[in-house]
Image (cartoon, rainbow, N blue to C red):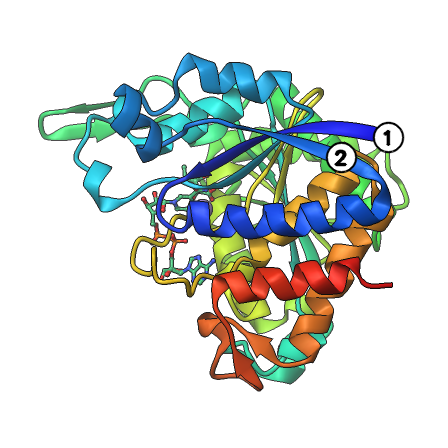
Amino acid sequence: MKRYTVALIKGDGIGPEIIDEAVKVLDAVSVKEGFEITYKEALLGGAAIDVTGEPIPEETIEIAKSADAVLFGAIGGPQWDDLPRDKRPETGLLKLRKALEVFANLRPVTVYDELVNASTLKPEVIQGTDLMVVRELIGGIYFGQPRAYEGDRAYNTMVYTKQEVYRIAKVGFEIAMKRNKKLVSVDKANVLEVSQLWRDTVNEVAKEYPEVSVEHMYVDNAAMQLVRDPKQFDVILTGNIFGDILSDEASMLSGSIGLLPSASIGEKYGLYEPIHGSAPDIAGQGIANPIATIASAAMMLRYQFGEESAAKRIEDAIKRVLKEGYRTKDLSSFDAKEVVTTSEMGSLIAQYASEI
Ligand code: NAD
Ligand code: IPM
Ligand code: MN
């Protein structure tokens, strides 16, 4: 029997609730598909601070690196917001991504037919939307030096090297080749030198992919186009901060941020995480939508383990629960037959994924 080890990082807020549901679903499909997953838990974010004083203990990096993949919930919360920057939960996550060198964050945006009425946008605008945000994850303004908060002055540096842009652009074009061969690179080249380098480098890589149509779009226009006509997009290639913002915006095309999964990949490691945060406002109430995390687990099975049919089982099960009208609270005003808890949603998906 095939065996995989998964480092499990629950984190803070709704993190533990949603990860528990993903594990439920993974366990159900692994029995059906004949593989076994062993989990090793590791601390990150506030949960790690409370125990060790550090947002990312050394042991967490070791566990993450020794596993076949990392499945992560979310970190952060108001109780840790006043800590110095290097001690904050968010710094732990950024250090984990950096340590694993997961430079490409893939954030697929799917609008389920069953949920076309769930978006705040008109059904005819969003129906059929299927796009992939390819976000650079371990560079740009998040990591650039110098950075400081000095009295009445504070600054950060947005920096990219050609090599960093080249490798993320390659990922974007490779994904476009497997999709509809349409890539929009998003930058702010009318103002920023770093974006000019981005654009020049993307144009260079584009020469290697003559079949892919390439368009450059300024980030402000892209934000507008995403809600005006999201179907024009296939692959959106962009830097760290623009990708962060645009993917939260794009999540509302699908109806809820609780639906969007992601895969963070590099040469060696893979980190699978929902795009949303720890949602402190709803933590502990059993109302969080676990679908983003369950779909991230499906991405892990596909990209990291090559378990395509297990991934498909999960994705089909998600479609089926939505089709049958089961909704967590975030989607409860839209064609809900029954409003279910986080745990009930996980159990339904686990059940459907193991049928057939
Ligand atoms: P958030 O994504 O946690 O929440 C934004 C809104 O969406 C909230 O109203 C929340 O209730 C809702 N929401 C999010 N996920 C949901 C789900 N699965 N089901 C139903 N509703 C959901 O963003 P925020 O409020 O800006 O940040 C809260 C904390 O999370 C902060 O500490 C922030 O730094 C952190 N954060 C962490 C990550 C991560 O771990 N990857 C990502 C984003 C934010
Ligand atoms: C995300 C989050 C993180 C980011 C934060 C918590 C560091 O918003 O995963 O999208 O900005 O990358
Ligand atoms: Mn974000």
Residue 245, how many percent across, how many down? Answer: 46, 50
Residue 153, how many percent across, how many down? Answer: 15, 28
Q: Are marks 1 and 2 in contact (CB under 8 Å)?
A: yes
Q: Is residue 88 visible?
A: yes
Vertical comparison of 119 with 353: above or below: below
Q: Quadrant of residue 228?
A: bottom right
Quadrant for the N terminus in the image? top right
Q: Which residue is mark 2?
A: 36
Question: Could you tell me which residue is drawn at 71 percent across and 63 percent down?
Answer: 351
Residue 143, how many percent across, how many down? Answer: 42, 24
Q: Residues within 10 Å of mark 1 (few under 14, many from 20)?
A: few
In the image, 239: left or right of 295? left
In the image, 309: left or right of 58? right
For marks 1 and 2, the one nearer the N-term is: 1
Local secondary structure at mark 1:
loop
Quadrant for the C terminus in the image? bottom right
**Distance of label 1 from label 2 (alpha carbons):** 7 Å
- Amino acid type of the residue tagged 2 in the rendering: Glu
In the image, 154: left or right of 262? left
Q: Residues within 10 Å of mark 2 (few under 14, many from 20)?
A: some
User: CB at mark 2 closer than 8 A to ligand 1?
Assistant: no
Q: Quadrant of residue 233?
A: bottom right
Residue 258, how many percent across, how many down? Answer: 51, 60
Question: Could you tell me which residue is drawn at 75 percent across and 59 percent down?
Answer: 353
Question: Could you tell me which residue is drawn at 27 percent across and 24 percent down?
Answer: 87
Q: Which residue is mark 1?
A: 1
Vertical comparison of 145 with 343: above or below: above
Local secondary structure at mark 2:
strand
- Amino acid type of the residue tagged 1 in the rendering: Met
Q: Residue furthest right?
A: 211
